[in-house]
Image (tube, grey):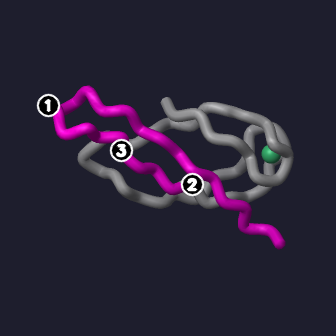
Amino acid sequence: MAIVTCPTCGEDFEVPAPGPLETPCTVDYDCEVCCSPMEITFECEDDGEGEGDSEITGWARGLVE
Ligand SMILES: [Zn+2]
């Protein structure tokens, strides 16, 4: 899981994170608190050591002006 902050309501919530091999990627998601649509970009925090032990970070961007 990755924790993202909703750009609309400011609440933190968890979203299912993709595997490290699938990042970076962008998915559409609805906020679990206010249901606003957003785009979440997942990136892998990789320090270059080993595999399968990387942390996935999600960055949310609102789709509503
Ligand atoms: Zn929200």
The outermost residue toward the left is: 50
Nearer-N-terminus badge (1/2): 2
The residue under label 2 is 40
Q: Quadrant of residue 44?
A: top left
Secondary element type, mark 1: loop
Q: Which residue is mark 3?
A: 44
Q: Secondary structure at mark 2?
A: strand
**Left or right, 21 with reference to 39:** left
Marks 2 and 3, how far apart at CA? 13 Å
Q: State the CA–CA distance, disc 1 to disc 3.
A: 13 Å
Image point (26%, 38%), residue name = 47
Residue 35 % position (x, y): 80, 48
Q: What is the x, y in percent for residue 65?
A: 83, 72
Instruction: Say left or right for 9 vs 48.
Output: right
* Residue at 85% across, 46% down: 9
Mark 1 in CB contact with mark 2 (< 8 angstroms): no
